[in-house]
Image (cartoon, coloured by chain):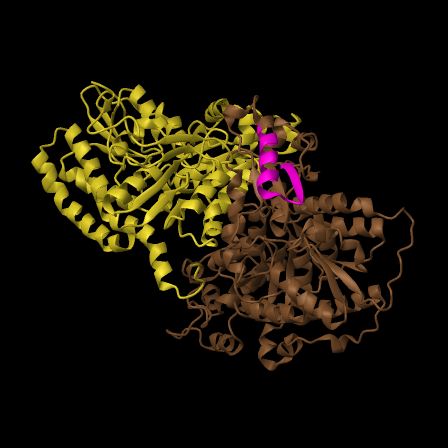
Amino acid sequence: MELTLWTYEGPPHVGAIRIAASMRHVHLMLHSPQGDTYADLLFTMIEREGRRPPVTYTTFQARDLGSSTAEMVVNSLRESAERFKPQVLMVADSCTAELIQDQPGALALGADLPVPVIPLEMAAYTRKENWGAAETFYQLVRGLLSRQAPPPGSERPTRDANIRPSVNLLGPTKLGFRCRDDVVEIERLLNSMGVDVNVVAPLGASPQDLQAIPKADANVNLCPEVSDLTCSWLARTFGMPTISTIPMGWGATRDFIVEVAAALDLDINVDAVGESRLPWYSRSIDSTYLTGKRVFVFADGSHAIAAARVARDEMGFEVVGLGTYSRERARDVRAAAKEYGLEALITDNYLEVEAKVQELQPEMVLGTQMERHIAKRLGIPCAVISTPAHVQDYPARYSPQMGFEGANVLFDTWVHPLIMGLEEHLLHMFRDDFEFNDSVGPSHLGSEGEGARAQGLPDDSQPDDGAVVWASEAEKELKKIPFFVRGKARRNTERFAFEHGLTTIEVDTLYDAKAHFSN
Amino acid sequence: MSSVIASSVGEHHPGPQTQERGQRAVFCGLTSIIWLHRRIQDAFFLVVGSRTCAHLIQSAAGVMIFAEPRFATAILGERDLAGMADCHEELDRVVGELIARRSGINRLFLVGSCPSEVIKLDLETAAAKLQVKHENRVRISAFSGSGIETTFTQGEDQCLKSTVAELPALGASEENLIVLGTVSDIVEDQFRRLFDDLDIKNVHFYPGRTAGDLPAVGKGTRVIAAQPFVGETARALIQRGAELISAPFPLGAEGSKAWFEAVAQAYGVDSERTEQVLELPYQRAKRAVSVHRSKLEGKRIHFLPDSQLEIPMARFLSEECGLGVNEIGTPFHDQLVMRGELARLPQDVPMVEGQDLDPALSRVRAARPDLTVCGMGIANALESEGLRTKWSIELVFSPVQGFDQAGDLAGLFAKPLAREEILEVGSWS
């Protein structure tokens, strides 16, 4: 039993619904109690979908238990097949249905339905949403393609030189982060390399489309959370190479181009494929103030790793924390964190993330909807870079995260919450101006974050352990440091005092610490 | 004394009534926690369930993480289900953690869910054991909000019902009034002023703003429902000697007037005095409703089952706003609490109890009403087909009861229609 306040991921059957909702001509019959239909609103409210996801829920109640739940499954299957006429009917249990063991998959296979059935096992008590999405996509692809598989060990036929090379974009889904726009951006990028996109799946694909997957020369593993399993099966079964660079940020986009060119044996000049304004925007002098800004990154695995690279190499930030809620990606994130000299934070406990942010006092947080709330509470600027995200993170405008335009979007989105360069300088100099001071917040953002400041949350509070005491003069001096760096100054000074065995912090201690940490 | 004080009531809806069984698109009772934890400010709700339960509550609540919430889920894992971990011991540990963390909590509700019900985890016994352990620190009890037993607003009914046994006994010569069902703080304040003016003393709102705020109950207790989803609690209070006053719900000018009149009558308040007290707010409410009438009059509305508020809302809209009602869908029809409403409903409105989603949606598509009241999962799907909607959870989350909210209530229904008139983009016609 695990105490949970907020959950980063839904249960695995929500992942199955995401696959069904992303596709055309599939239907999911979910054996589930009354109430599980709440999942519809994730799509219709958060992503403003104009249709219910293609799911029929059995919605059994207590009175049905023990007698008629299996019958409800069969009826729902027949009605779904009849009403929606899908090309494929998927069948799964939600958590409660798993306990009553009606085996809807077996019932479906035995019900002589006029449609191919793919039964799913969702492992509700050990797994979560992304796993459910990955497993569903894999079962669907395998179920539809295994009959086409060549005998093991067969050579993959070489592409006719007259046929343009093509790849599949695998992984993008509904309720993924900016998948809608990333697909457009990456397709555009590939086209400018002379590469066609054969199938995009699951987003927008029909089961018939999936059957065309082996026609492409390679698979782009665009959202590994969803497509890892499928890409490796396709690699094993059809000998299709997997392109695994996530093209997020300027450098990664170029790496992606190189990887695609190598996989397809193309002669490509990377510089000619496209360009982004990010490198120049980052070099222009206005961006100097971004240098060494301490950022905390927490997201799903692929967005966390990609964002850390952009943050350090392309924005000039210092990555002070890196983590993920996704245990399936823990190994990759741990390895990435090592490159930044960090130990990765692998947890799906929101409170642990909050404690870490509070401890690190970063100047910026790149995270999910959860971290947006944590940052708001602590008065720290934040940009959302990953699911789970709320309705405002499914914008009307074109806003990819990947490719060269995606790099532009990242630059803008991450700079926007920060106080502008010259404004920051003036706040350092004259912080007592009655109209223009740091408690007002960035001048272009209204009063966002003011609540936390007004309440004098953590940055102004005394440390919990009474080991180090601030002399009142030192405390006053600390308050002269602008809000957005005060937390860091407090933390560094206390650490300095502790390391030097001091029990009281005087004004000189503050400046000694400043000198100590300035190198 | 009969246990139900009836004024003008009807047992049955006079119009056509059918029952449907099939796919139901309603929340489960856990959803009630979203408003209960805000209303009862020192209570904590610990759902014992699955990740689905946790995900449901945060999704239905719109992920409003501004502080650590006063609810959480103890998520059952495979170890718990396989019997490798003793659920009671695990619960003991989790509750210990929670209580250590949240010092301001005076009341802990263990909330049963679909999985906990199916594995027959006895939360009442667990609560009793935990109570012994935390005797002087926090009051602990259990109720079920599971989807197999409750829909949406019924969670509140189960929660309140679970506390009825704790209510102190009312002295033999004493009288009091229990206003049953969560109302917003401002509605409570307005109602208290009117009860004062009517000289009705000893009024308790249940649930109150704190968990310890429990009314006494006994022979001298009268109960009036402020919400239509509190039938089981009403029955439990009747069992303890209380009388239920039947009335329409305090929605709209007429509903609010009839509601206060029913209470006043039960208390034997002089009818002239009642008239005098209610006249000013009643006229003000009528003026406020009339502002929206031009938008609403002659329009047709369709209710899909969701919050249990469908019947009183249909009554308010047909009686006071001139809407035609196509169909009233309701998750279930509790005749005890709906008595005061039925006589006021238009005779010919079909009422459907239960749900079979796809055929129900087909009826909406065929009828193409001007406005459909439905759950959040369905609203955008209908909007994209050119059908205006009002999502019903807003009716539960907004202060809509009483004279001074009557205009706001009409406004909630007028707004989608007004928006349709304003917008020059994306026309569906």
Q: Quadrant of residue B342?
A: top left
Q: Which residues are magenta?
A: A72-92
Vertical side of B316 occupied by A168: above or below: below
Does the stretch in magenta take in A79? yes
User: Which residue appears at 22% of the width and 36% of the height?
Assistant: B259
Q: Nearer the viewer, residue B269 or A172?
A: A172
The image position of residue B9, as x and y in percent, is 23, 28
Name the tint of chain A in the rendering.
brown
The image position of residue B62, as x and y in percent, is 47, 49
Outermost residue to the front? B366
Secondary structure character of the magenta stretch overall: helix
Left or right, residue A412 beside residue B347 = right
The image position of residue A454, as x and y in percent, is 40, 61
Q: Nearer the viewer, residue A370 or A189?
A: A189
Res B64 visible: no
The image position of residue B326, as x and y in percent, is 35, 42
Q: Quadrant of residue A72?
A: top right
Does the stretch in magenta take in B227? no
User: Which residue appears at 47% of the width and 52% of the height?
Assistant: B380
* Total marks in image: 0
| Chain rendered yellow | B
Quadrant including the N terminus of chain A: top right
Q: Nearer the viewer, residue B21 or B54?
A: B21
Res A25 visible: yes
